[in-house]
Structures are given as C-alpha cells and as structure tokens.
Image (tube, grey):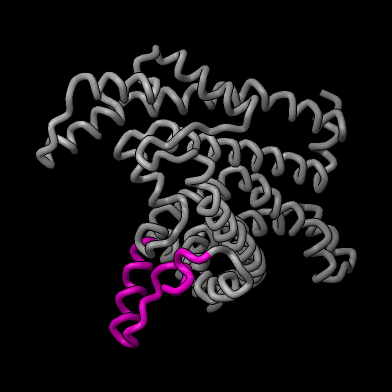
Amino acid sequence: MAIYIGRRLLQLIPLLIAISMIVFIIIQLPPGDFLTTYVEQLKLSGTDVAESTIMNLTAQYGLNEPLYVQYWLWIKNIVLHGDLGTSFQWNLPVSQVIGDRLALTMVISILSLVIVWAIAIPAGIYSATHQYSVGDYALSFLGFIGMAVPGFLIALILVYFVFDKTGVSITGLFSPEYQDAPWSLAKVLDMLPRLAVPVVLVGLSGTASLIRVMRGMLLDELSKQYVITARAKGAGERRLLFKYPVRMAINPLISTIGWTLPALISGEAIVGIVLNLPTTGPVLLKALMVQDMYLAGSFLLILSVLTVIGTLLSDILLAVLDPRIRFGGAGS
C-alpha cells in the first residue's frame, strides 16, 4: 500500500508541472493583456495615457518579458516562496485577494459534497432495492429535474420568490454590519444560517446525478451470481446488501471525488455571482475579463491541484476498499 501511494505521489510532480504550463499558456492566449485593457478603459473615460507611462507600467508588470520568462518567474516564486504573484487589478498579492474567498469557497464546496453523499447514497440504495415503486419513480423524476435545471437558475428563482414574499434578501453570506468586519465568533455565527442556501444549490445537480449512478451500479450488483447464490443459502437481505453489493456500488462514487470537488467549486462560481457571495467565483470572472493573468492563473492552478489531489484520494480510498486494486497496483 505504501509503495502504491508513493508511486502515485511521484507521478503527480510532472503532472503538476505540465498543468501549470498549460494554465499559464491558456491565460495568455487571448489577444492583448491586462495593460492593454486598462489603457483602453482609461481612454474611454477620457483620460490620456502617455507613452512613457505605458512603458513604465509594462516594465513594472513584467509584460515586456518573453512568455517563458514570465512563466518561469511565476512558477519559481510559487515553488520557492509560496508567492502566487501580484494581482494587477487589485494591486495586492494574489494570496491576499483570494485568501478568505478561497476558504469560504472550500467550506461551501466541502459541505455540499457531504450533503451530496449523505443524500445520494441512501436514496440510490432505496431506489435500487425498491425498483419500479412509487418512491423509485419519484426519486428518478427529482433526479432528472436536478440534472436538467442549472443551480444558478434555481438561485435566481429562489432569490426572487423569497424577496417577493418576505422582503428579505438571501444574497450574501453576512449581514451588512459584518460585511467588512474582522473574523470573530459573532461573524461566524452570523454566517452559518446563510450557508444553507448556497450549500444546497451547489450540491443539487451533483446529488441528482450520483443518485442515478448509485441506483444503476447497485442494480447491476444485485443481479450478479454471488448475490443470487447468497440468497439461495439463506443469507439475510440486509446483511447481504451492505456486505458486498453496496461496497461495490460505492466504488464509482469514490472514483468521482477527483472531479466532483472541482466541479462543485466551478458550480459555486456561477451561484456565487447570482447570490453575491464573497467567494472566488466573482473574482475569477473579473480576472478573466480583464486578463489579470497572475490572479486568474493562480486560481486555475489551485483548481487543477484540487483535481489532482481529489483523484489521488479517490485512488487511495478505492485501494483501501477494494483489495483487487491494492494488490494489483502494488504488483504492477
């Protein structure tokens, strides 16, 4: 097991290097750069920008260097100093811009993941063991609705409905008096009730799809010969169900951790914009629009690292739960 995990960790190094290169190149692909956009905005507002000022700003932001030099400076500072660079539009270190926002995004995403699993696994088990029942049809219907309707649309409808009926705005994570206040126990307690709406909305589509996956996999396991044989020998239905079929059916859900967590964070981006949440979504959108390469690139790199870490966790959990993977991986 240790050899298997060690080999998987070593494989991450070249993968992360390749991901960082791809992310940086993608950020640079659109024509122009942040300075071009900034100068155009100044000219549209009627402000003339001297050529010397443009040259000074170009040198200050390092935009006069070749692409590979810009990448090397960025990745070297990340690896050696943990410095993600400076955000052009905020004129602040990237870590300072996304620090609290990334933490809030992770809280919402992890809570959503917990809710997704807590609902999807029991619902999938019930749907598979009560195939073609009223409950199965109801869960299937809700699952299709959840997969078909995007979370941000439900967020828009919910915001309008609640405000129209009660006059209360459910946008934001804090009351006005805590918006810019430093973190404290009172601020955390103010935030907790407001987390419910974004957590449920972010996890909605993931719950719906995983119910369908769990149902399909468990139905497949229940039709296999070892289950039929165990039933014929008089094994108890509940013990039989949870000893093998459910364990095997959960495998695909565990293997999806690698993309589920980044997908939740990406889904949070749109929901965050609609609900005006102080998370990374609105900041990333603005950074991409103005080509703030260090801010956008750092966030995309973090998202990619989360995908890789999630995939590693999936592999380890699968190896723990399924001896075939553990011994097969160690022997190869």
Please provide percent x and percent y for residue 4: 82, 30
Residue 318 or 249: which is nearer the viewer? 318
Residue 188 placement: quadrant: bottom right
Residue extending farthest to the bottom is 166
Please report the bounds of the magenta region as a residue range.
Answer: 152-181
Task: Answer with left or right where residue 309 lies relative to residue 204.
Answer: right
Name the dominant secondary structure of the magenta segment: helix
Residue 231 or 54: which is nearer the viewer? 54
Please provide percent x and percent y for residue 30: 29, 27
Q: Is residue 164 magenta?
A: yes
Task: Answer with left or right where residue 112 lies relative to residue 44.
Answer: right
Residue at image position (74%, 29%) is: 8
Residue at image position (24%, 24%) is: 53
Q: Is residue 332 above or below residue 169?
A: above
Residue 132 placement: quadrant: bottom right
Residue at image position (70%, 54%) is: 250
Residue 195 or 148: which is nearer the viewer? 195
Q: Quadrant of the C terminus?
A: top right
The answer, for residue 156, to whether it is visible in the render is yes
Task: Answer with left or right where residue 28 lies relative to residue 126.
Answer: left
Q: Quadrant of the N terminus?
A: top right
Please provide percent x and percent y for residue 78: 59, 28
Task: Answer with left or right where residue 138 lies relative to residue 2.
Answer: left
Residue 232 or 241: which is nearer the viewer? 241
Q: Is residue 217 above or below residue 56?
A: below
Q: Is residue 63 magenta?
A: no
Please provide percent x and percent y for residue 27: 39, 29
Q: Is residue 51 above or below residue 330?
A: above
The number of numbered discs placed on residues in the rendered structure image is 0
The answer, for residue 148, to whether it is visible in the render is no
Q: Is residue 59 above or below residue 111?
A: above
